[in-house]
Image (cartoon, helix red, strand yellow):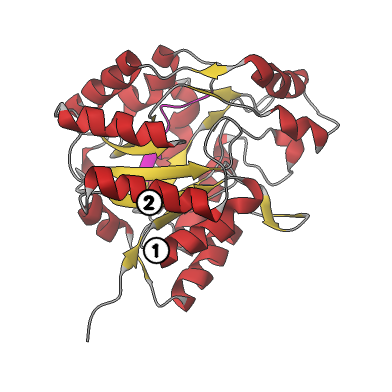
Amino acid sequence: MASKRKVIITCAVTGAIHTPSMSPHLPVTADEIAEAAIAAAEAGAAILHLHARDPKDGKPTQDPEAFRPFLSKIKSATSAVVNITTGGSPHMTVEDRMRPAMEFKPEVASLNMGSMNFGLFPMLERFKTFEHDWERQHLENSRDLIFKNTYKDIETILRKGADNGTRFEFECYDISHLYNLAHFMDRGLVQSPPFIQSVFGILGGIGPDPEDLMHMRRTADRLFGDNYLWSILGAGRNQIPLATMGAAMGSNVRVGLEDSLWIGPGQLASSNAEQVKRIRIILEALNLDIATPDEARAMLQLKGGDKVNF
């Protein structure tokens, strides 16, 4: 009997897109982030993608000291793979965005594969009141925002990550980002197989239509053959539908409150773990197995949790 395919679930616990006023369930403090991440791992997430926030007002921060308390708690409570952002916030410099990954030398870090418009301002139509002044400004400023990820930026992150033994979740928001990844692979700066996170539904990137997902897949197949691992990230209401479509086509999946605050139409997710449990039910109904952290390490050829700096 053929063995069932293993699917890696990544959970993006908290990020720079949503603000604390948008959901009471978004983790902000180090204790809340640690608790949410551990619960997501217990629900089946093999990889935990992590940002940090200022506990006073929930503003995204790349200060390594904001990461340190929850990283130690997560490591002591779970064997999940830790993936630290180098995206941070589009409003930060590349140097600031790299600080936590350089300090903690994780097994995996995220890497955005191209510069792009990054429009968050449509959220102002849904959310009218905010607790902190920075929140409305954060969304409004995205009308005139370019998320800068130049070839120099990407090469710098790749080289410094390689020095630390860190591999990358390559976040591809559009077709051109796949070609950028192929460029760096041709130059020998990316190890095989790359872990490609296809991102759908962010204004400024590729849309969330099923045909967009198919176009991403066809292009990745043309550029990389069978020499890559694929994962699907659908923003907002697209999270579960696109992850389900991708999984049926052979992808891994990413969920979490960084990408979507919702569990159903008009219904806020109560936790990251709730989203992990929901996609796990779907994957198991498709007769797919959920990869453990160690299985994910083997699939992604990671250095191991004992070789990080936290």
Q: Which residues are magenta?
A: 82-89
- Residue with the mark numbered 1: 249
Q: Is residue 221 visible?
A: yes
Task: Specify the amino acid type for callout 2.
Answer: Arg
In the rendered image, residue 228, in percent from the top left (x then y), is placed at 25, 49
Within the magenta stretch, is there residue 247?
no
Placement of 85 over or under 214, stated as above or below: above
Q: Is residue 305 visible?
A: no
- In what quadrant of the picture does the C terminus appear? top left
* Contact (Cβ within 8 Å) of mark 2 with mark 1: yes
The quarter holding residue 59 reads top right
Placement of 98 over or under 107, stated as above or below: above
Q: Give the camera-side residue of 79 and 7.
A: 7
Mark 2: secondary structure: helix
- Residue with the mark numbered 2: 217
Q: Give the camera-side residue of 135 and 74.
A: 135
Q: Residue furthest left?
A: 188
Residue 6 tag number:
none
Task: Specify the amino acid type for callout 1.
Answer: Met
Q: Residue at x 62, y 41 (%)?
A: 27
Q: Residue at x 23, y 28 (%)?
A: 184
Q: Residue at x 34, y 16 (%)?
A: 153
Q: Residue at x 27, y 20 (%)?
A: 155
- In what quadrant of the picture does the N terminus appear? bottom left
The quarter holding residue 248 reads bottom left
Q: Main secondary structure of the magenta part?
A: loop
Crowd class of label 1 (few under 14; some 14 to 19; many from 20; radius 10 Å): few
In the rendered image, residue 251, in percent from the top left (x then y), is placed at 38, 58
